[in-house]
Image (tube, rainbow, N blue to C red):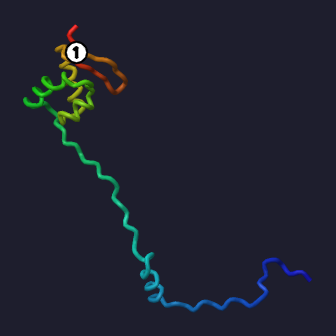
Amino acid sequence: PLLPCCVYVEGEMPPKPEKSKAAKLKAATSGSKGKKKKWTKGKVHEKANNLALFDKGTFDKLLKEVPNYKLITPAVVSDRLKIRVSLARRGINELVKKGLVKLVASGHSQAIYIRATKE
């Protein structure tokens, strides 16, 4: 007669000895797997404390240094002068009115300017 394929013919395995709760806890905490994984908090982004209004020194710096930059964008001006981008945009608009810089390209959110050359 044929036996079904999943029948275990030889002897059965003996039952495992029951452990007490204390023994189970000890086994769980001992060894390398017992320590809890420490997650990194991720990279903490440093908050930029930029000026929201021009002070005298910053505005003078804008008028003197920015027209000498090779590439002028609100982001570059904001980064170098430590002012907000909205303030940088308004400052650049002042420079355009004075003829110190000129607009090269303007997209949806960024505008690119260069120093005005004498023609």
In terms of depth relative to the viewer, which is nearer, 70 or 82? 70
Q: Residue furthest top?
A: 119
- For this view, does 87 lie left or right of residue 30? left
Image coordinates of residue 98 in percent, x first then y, are: 16, 14
Looking at the image, is 99 positioned above or below residue 28?
A: above
* Picture quadrant of residue 65: top left
Q: Where residue 76 sits: x, y (%)?
A: 25, 31
Residue visible at 42% across and 82% down in the picture: 30
Q: In this view, does 119 lie to the left or right of 64?
A: right
Count neighbours of disc 1 (C-alpha within 10 A) and say few if under 14, some if 14 to 19, many if 20 or more: some
- Name the residue that disc number 1 marks: 116
* Residue in the image at 14% along x and 32% along y: 53
Q: In this view, does 93 lie above or below 8?
A: above
> Amino acid under label 1?
Ala
For image coordinates 12% across by 24% down, the residue present is 64
Residue 7 percent across, percent down from the top left: 79, 82
SS of the residue under disc 1: loop
How far across and down, in percent of the image, does residue 39 sit? Answer: 37, 63
- Please state, as top left, top right, bottom left or bottom right, where the C terminus lies in the image: top left
